[in-house]
Image (tube, coloured by chain):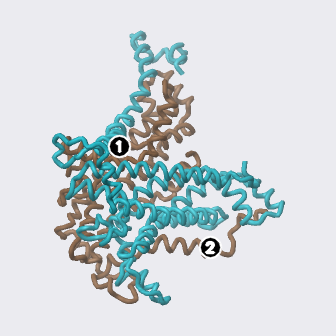
Chain colours: A brown, B cyan
Amino acid sequence: MTRIWSAGRLTYPALTLTALLSIFPIYWMFVVASRSSDAMGQVPPPLTPGGNLGANITRLFANPDAHFLTGLVNSTIVAVSVTFSVVLFSTLAGFAFAKLRFRGRNALLMVIVATMMVPTQLGVIPLYLLMTKLNWNDRLPAVIVPALVTGFGVFMMRQYAAQAVSTELIEAARVDGCHTLRIYWNVVLPALRPAAAVLGLLTFMTTWNDFLWPYAVLNDPENPTVQLSLRALSDGYYQDMSQVFTGTAIATLPLLLVFVVFGRQIIGGIMEGAVKA
Amino acid sequence: MVVQVDGPPPGAVRTRSRRPEREHRLARLDVRYSPYLYVTPFFLLFAIFGLYPLAYTFWVSLHDWDLLGVDPAFVGAQNYTQLMADADFWNSVVNTLGIFVLSTVPQLLAALWLANLLNRRLRARTTWRMAVLVPNVTSTAAVAIVFAVLFGREFGMINWLLDLVGVDAIDWKANRFAAWTAISAMVDWRWTGYNALIFLAAMQAIPRDLYESASIDGAGRARQFWSITVPLLKPTIIFAVIISTIGGLQLFTEPRLFNSGTNAIRGGPLRESQTMTMYMFENAFAPHYNFGYGSAVAWLLFALIAVVAAINVLILRRLGGGARKGDR
């Protein structure tokens, strides 16, 4: 009877094929990034890394159209600030929704779930007008401030807090005269740490990858995010593909590193969220 | 919870200050109002930067609104009637729907299949899961650029492989259906593994004795998959379809970076792969800055998302509604 759970004859070959398809474009990106620009025209296409990576990196950072270093710095600033804020506000609100009683709690929670379905990307035009009014166009607050909270984050923290935070502990802390913010800091946050870490990682990756809104609002070519640097490279009149691919590889590297180190936790977070959603 | 603050518990007496009255009142205020304080940042920021812009888009769409924005003229439904007669707009609608179907249907079917494979007893379980999820954690823009090269006409690897099996080179960017296929390939590549993990999580929540009794009744693997797994997965599948619909119909980064050069926002020489979001962007931002017209595109896209999501849910409900063994 347990036969149906064991791997079949084709299970491992099929998984291997899928894994190869998943990894190949990333691998090939690094191959081209490490070769000279004539690698593109070779038949058959080269499949092993070359020795040109250092030279490509030097040329990339010197490219006057890409402003690649500025892009990296800007993306880091944006992604770190957004991640910090999303984790803070999500854990606070998630704690309130899971463990505190207040009038309208359930209705407000439903609103949060509904906001996850709202295609906010379609509001970019008024958002652009708003940024013009605030004089934030071409400046980083324009991409940071609208991303400071997510309904997904609040909901995820609420689900986790409901089962991971001990109500007895909260009550005991209250009896000892702790105010609510102190309870959040000393009791709730430590209990939420694993899920908050996953939320932070997911938020960092999403923010790092964001393209449409930065593309709309950051029009100064000298002040891009790293994704906008990639666009400038890719739209360039003269395309040196090994240089473009060096850019894509460097822009992907932080995400891959995060994934290699925390992959197990990220997978856990995605799968746990799925069961409860 | 409030009760325990009211009644002085023995252990707490020591820690009370000399002004119990005031402390007491503060504690009550804290218990009653602090929850609102904690949820307010979300609602405030979402209202300002999420909901208000979306609603205000409709107001802008009723105006002839340009970059200066000084006293925009109210024009009623004019932007909408103009869109109805705009061939480029309808072209973007067809592209959006075509790419959506080509990217969502194979993606969800493949994800189901992949989840079923991952649901077996496997060696190196986490490694396999990481391998299928890795496309999802890469930079979207980077991947779009890489795929654009893989699907290149002259030196692309896909055409080289096709040539090995005797198929002539395809001009992926200048042929509508080919462009749809290439862009859908990027979307599929990115999201299949992610959805597979979502389905896998739901599969693991199905009680195993259901399969064991089906097995005793003589149902084979395939039969069990279609009669037990799929029906019990229906809520998760509906969830995945809605999320894919909302994301898929707003597709922008992949088609935008699949094309390159000065007019890439048009999605190819004859707009072969321009999606609705790209068309909105082309009109609303540099160099045209026609905010009113772009906003009308945004609202029609919003309506399309709502309609397609509703149709999908109706179809899926119907599909699983038949009397199937194992359906509850």
Q: Position of residue B130 (x, y in %)?
A: 51, 63
User: Residue A145: in sight, yes or no?
Assistant: no
Q: Position of residue B249 (x, y in %)?
A: 43, 57
Q: Residues within 10 Å of mark 2 (few under 14, many from 20)?
A: some
Q: Is residue A80 above or below residue A108?
A: below
Amino acid found under the numbered disc labelled 2: Tyr
Amino acid found under the numbered disc labelled 1: Leu
Q: Which residue is mark 2?
A: A12
Of B290 and B142, nearer the camera is B290
Q: Which residue is mark 1?
A: B54
Q: Residues within 10 Å of mark 1 (few under 14, many from 20)?
A: many
Of B304 and A239, nearer the camera is B304
Query: Which disc number belongs to residue A108?
Result: none
Residue for point 63% across, 52% down? B234
Residue for point 81% across, 56% down? B213
User: Residue A106: in sight, yes or no?
Assistant: yes
Where residue B62 sits, quadrant-wise, is top left
- Give left or right: position of B223 versus B85: right
Q: CA separation, marks 1 and 2? A: 47 Å
Residue for point 51% across, 57% down? A264
- Give left or right: position of B327 versus A158: right
